[in-house]
Amino acid sequence: MRGLRAAVRRLAPRLRRLDALAAALLALYAALALSTELGANVAGQGLDPVWAEARQRGTLRVAIDLGFYPFTWVDEAGQPAGYDVDLARAVAQRLDLGVEFVPSGLDAIYDDLAARRADMAASALPYAPEQSWRASFSSFYFNAGQVLVAPAGSPIDGEDKLAGRTVAVPLGSDADTHARRLMAAGTPLTLRAEYDTPEEALDAVLRGEADAAIVDNASALMALGRRPGLSIAAALTLEPYVLAFAPEAFELRERANRALEDLRREGFFDELGHKWFVEAEPPAQNTSRESTP
């Protein structure tokens, strides 16, 4: 009996050390589980505070620049509406969060993200790598670049078919700039740039005043549903729209990217495009960000 007691006394310090080690391991596992849930990266990036706070609130705060139809708009009830508004709601739903819209301006959105007044920006934002010092970006979800529009059945299916053709563009727009670059590069086309809006340039094609028009993709999609006989012949430039986040919101960004992939695979963007570019009735006033004289 004395030998057994002596053996227990000798083993006691070792057992206490093993108990302490087990407790430490349990604490470590608990911390890892909590950090993963809140948005930490166990590979060394640390905690994503934006994602952690969004989870704690239960809402995703989304900065939007209202007044750029059909992406961000105010409906008749005074509520945010539009392509990007629906997209933000869908992303938040995939993250099991509610959504709270934060009115902003195109020149203030990045400041709102940096100051943590918003978690994400969804406002027809072109990909802007020059802003990467204060923002990070999602994968592309819409191409707002310039497209070539021609009558259905026209042999014009690309820039190489514009020689000797008359091309309509809105004066002072990106389409105007692109057409002039084609001319400077040697394409012998006749440019008609007396139109104030993309819709007027497209109507010129319908009236036979021009063989084709160059307009931005969003304007083309909205107009074609109401102008039978025209079709998009070719995409000419790439201007991708993205969601924006604060640089430290790496976990939120990755989760949003996965949500975008799922939505794209499920056909959500096809439905969204049809809703806002075909079914919705555009406002009477011009809401383009491009300045025209």
Image (tube, grey):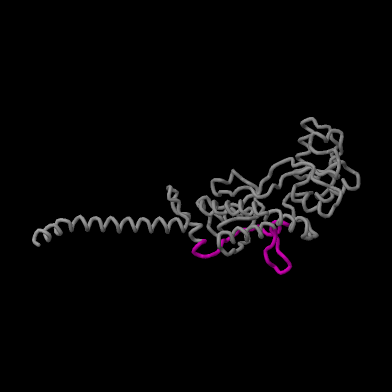
Q: Position of residue 270 (x, y in %)?
A: 71, 53
Q: Position of residue 35 (x, y in %)?
A: 43, 56
Magenta-highlighted residues: 54-82
Q: Position of residue 141 (x, y in %)?
A: 65, 50
115 vs 145, left or right, is left
185 vs 190, left or right, is left
The residue shown at (66%, 46%) is 240
The residue shown at (59%, 49%) is 138
Q: Position of residue 206 (x, y in %)?
A: 88, 48
Residue that lies at the very extreme toward the left in this rendered image: 2
Residue that lies at the very extreme toward the right in this rendered image: 208
On whether residue 170 falls in the magenta region, the answer is no
Q: Quadrant of residue 21?
A: bottom left
Q: Is residue 265 above or below residue 283?
A: above
Q: Quadrant of residue 119?
A: bottom right
Q: Is residue 230 above or below residue 156?
A: below
Residue that lies at the very extreme toward the top in this rendered image: 186
Q: Is residue 152 above or below residue 13?
A: above
195 and 142: which is toward the camera: 142
Residue that lies at the very extreme toward the front in this rendered image: 1
**Placement of the N terminus among the 4 image quadrants:** bottom left
How many marks are shown on the rendered structure?
0
197 vs 75, left or right, is right
227 and 286: which is toward the camera: 227
The residue shown at (72%, 41%) is 237
